[in-house]
Image (spheres, helix red, strand yellow):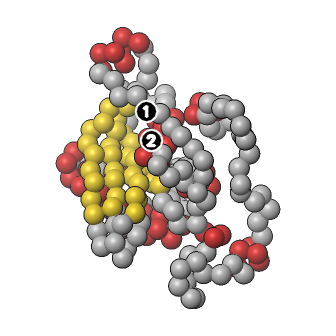
Amino acid sequence: AGRFTREIVPVGGRTDDQRPRVLRPQSLARLPAAFVPGGTVTAGNSSPVSDGAAAVAVVPERLRAAAGLPGLRLLAGAVAGCDPALPGWGPVPAVRRVLRRTGADLEKVAAVEIVEAFAAQVLAVTDALGLDPLGADAGRVCADGGALALGHPWGASGAVVVTRLFSRLLGAPSGTLGLAAVAVGGGLGIAALFEVV
């Protein structure tokens, strides 16, 4: 409780979400495949389409410093495409491009946030990048949950994932690295590497 307090600004209207709270493995196992007969993607391992919004202020360093506020500096960003038949794979070439541009080593990145619509995509992307979100990298990769747990606010995913990253890195020493990545459909992926200032 309270993990997201710094990120949430109350607005009028509904404050609950559409997610069912009681999930049983037996119920999840009975869900039909969503796309192809016998497939493994179901409503139980897919993120919900959620209401959500985020705001990210991009300001000159001198203004941020004068205000005495914490911040992140964008080191590099990349958009990459891959075969549209591989939905959700786009973050892999985008992350690799960002790391190449900066010369950064993924092992030196303290926090990684990846927005994906389906659990299998997250696992495929992290596996391709050499990350183990269920083991050694559990504290680095989507440590507070990814899109399955937190929702997938279409049209706001990029700002939401950067806000999530900023919140996780708040209070970290200057120079600490964070990586944000999003699969945006049609084989596209976006990634950005930030450092704490």
As shown in the figure, which amino acid type bears the numbered disc 2?
A: Ala
Residue 93: where, in percent of width, then height?
28, 62
Q: Residues within 10 Å of mark 2 (few under 14, many from 20)?
A: some
The residue sitting at the front extreme is: 13
Would you say 157 lies left or right of 7 here? Answer: left
The residue that appears at 33% across and 51% down in the rendered structure is: 191
Quick check: 81 above or below 68?
Answer: below
As shown in the figure, which amino acid type bears the numbered disc 1?
A: Val
Residue 74: where, in percent of width, then height?
30, 36
Image-quadrant location for residue 196: top left
The residue that appears at 44% across and 18% down in the rendered structure is: 69
Quick check: 155 above or below 59?
Answer: below
Q: Quadrant of the C terminus?
A: top left
Quick check: 116 above or below 163?
Answer: below
The residue that appears at 61% across and 34% down in the rendered structure is: 8
Would you say 17 lies left or right of 63 here? Answer: right
Would you say 88 lies left or right of 27 here? Answer: left
Q: Earlier in the sequence, mark 1 or mark 2?
A: 1
**Residue at disc 1, secondary structure:** loop
Residue designated by label 2:
159
Are dots 1 and 2 in contact, CB under 8 Å?
A: yes
Residue designated by label 1:
56
**Residue at disc 2, secondary structure:** helix
The residue that appears at 30% across and 73% down in the rendered structure is: 83
Q: Residues within 10 Å of mark 1 (few under 14, many from 20)?
A: few
Residue 50: where, in percent of width, then height?
60, 52
